[in-house]
Amino acid sequence: MPDRPEPPPASPPVRPAVPADAGEIARLRSAYVLSEPLGHAWLAVTREQLAQRLRPEGDARAYVVDAPDGGLAACALALVHRVLPGPGYPRGLAARIHAVATEPAHRRRGYARAVVSSLLGHLQMDGVTLFELHASDEAAPLYAELGFTRDPALMRMIRPVGQPSARLSRDREP
């Protein structure tokens, strides 16, 4: 019998996130995106706020892959905001991708590409044309394949209310 070609790998089962996913998205972001994990109090605040923002009228959009043993295997989260319109973004809609994370046990399966691609497609259908993210060196090639380019002008500052020069502790109660 002649050898049959292997069927292509199945696409990861990606779905839009719902408010009930907020806790898992917050956990993945804390564990795999932030430079320091959040404390329990900040995780609770993040979960509550994200659940509200993931509602249909909210500004958060996310796509996820469920883990077979419960929880999430991967997620991509963006927040949509208004900017002044211009030729590249005539509707004045931009999205900052805040978190793309995959549990280590589920990496190298195309989950990050799948959730980011689904998220970008959804955002484009919503009229978003300006996309921003911070990329690790490890993830930069994926984002470049999806059309992102580096912007050397981007700078960042954190200035908490009431603390003009100190950074807010991740362990301090919100």
Image: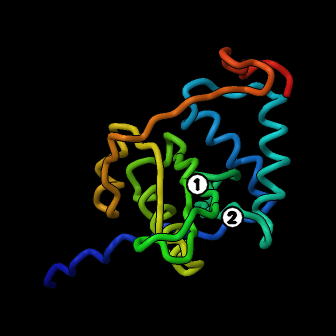
* Residue at 53% across, 72% down: 128
The residue identified by callout 1 is: 75
* Residue at 49% across, 67% down: 12
Q: Secondary structure at mark 2?
A: loop
In this picture, residue 41 sits left or right of residue 71? right
Counting residues from the N terminus, which is met first, the one under dot 2 or under dot 1?
2
What is the x, y in percent for residue 27? Answer: 69, 40
Dot 2 and dot 1 residues touching (CB under 8 Å): yes
- Eyeballing the image, is 162 above or below 153? above
What is the x, y in percent for residue 1? Answer: 15, 84
Q: Tag on residue 66?
A: none
> Please, what is the three-letter code of the amino acid marked with disc 1?
Cys
In this picture, residue 146 sits left or right of residue 163? left
Instruction: From the viewer's side, name the closer residue of 15 and 167.
Output: 167
The residue identified by callout 2 is: 17
Q: Secondary structure at mark 1?
A: strand
Q: Report the residue that reaches farthest toward the left.
A: 2
